Amino acid sequence: MAAPHVAGLVALLLTQPGWATAGPTYIMSYLKSHSRADAFTGALPNDTWGSGKLDARIALPSVPSLRFISPARGSTYTSAYGRSDLLSSGGSFDSIRVWLSLDACNYDQYVTTMRAPFRNPIQVLFAGRDTTSSARLRAIGYRGTTRVDVFSDGLFTLNHPMPTGVAGEEQPLSFTVRPNRPNPFNPKTDISFDVPERERVTVRVYSTDGRLVRRLLDNELGPGRYGTSWDGTNGSGAAVSSGIYFFEVIAGSERASRRMTLIR
């Protein structure tokens, strides 16, 4: 067994759960048990091949991996009433638990616990009820005694579209976008709209020259009446100046825009 090959594999083994206290004798015995002979090595052991050829992919224990695929750093994520692709896994887990931090420090907002089997990417029903520009997610995957702890890629803005429909109200028959209220406004205005069938819905705010100011919503919504709000800030969380802006709602092939005035 070549020395660089063995040294690299031992370093990887020592990072795995349960291996930190493994001694040299146990590690050598383990590596020898995963070595093999073939036509090139001849009889083992010998001075050229030592205990034989070592296949690191077989010798290294299979440790599952887990990572967030969304939300991206600096993006705006709108929690809604459907499942979103949040995680990707390599290998299998018995369960995965997801937590949310609203202040980039304390992961005290429980989101969900999922149990095997999982489909990749892993969809999470994420329906938080808070709006913050300092959100971050944490996921912990469990398989036996192995625990994999991962975090989303930096801070993102969490927006929550509140349903405004009344219980028992009939399903909307058409796509409808209402004027924002109040208008003019300071510091915040509410936007409401009806979606007659399940669609991918986006709500964006634009300046009068057509530049995107803020993405308020981008998610799949079922039939119903929904509402979101704009607080007069851009995608970075900075306050924008007084003036005229437009919000646009797109649901599938339908779209509508309304004019609104921000007064500082």
Image: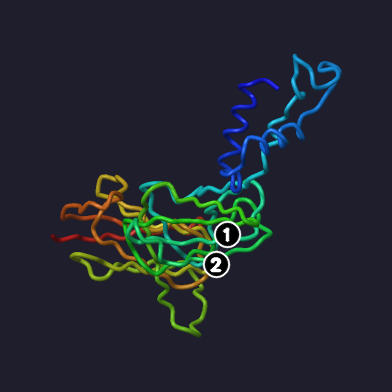
- Residue 239 placement, left or right of 113: left
Q: Quadrant of residue 202?
A: bottom left
Q: Give me the residue at 25% from left, 55% from top.
A: 233
Q: Give me the residue at 62% from left, 47% from top.
A: 64
Residue 38's label in the rendered image is none
Residue 216 at what x, y percent from top left? 36, 58
Amino acid bearing label 2: Glu
Please say if 118 is above or below 191: above
Q: Quadrant of residue 45?
A: top right
Q: Give me the residue at 48% from left, 72% from top.
A: 224
- Residue 121 placement, left or right of 106: right
Please say if 35 is above or below 181: above
Residue 235 at what x, y percent from top left? 31, 50
Residue 93 at what x, y percent from top left? 64, 55
Amino acid bearing label 1: Ile
The residue mark sitting in front, 1 or 2, is 1
**According to the image, label 2 marks what residue?**
197
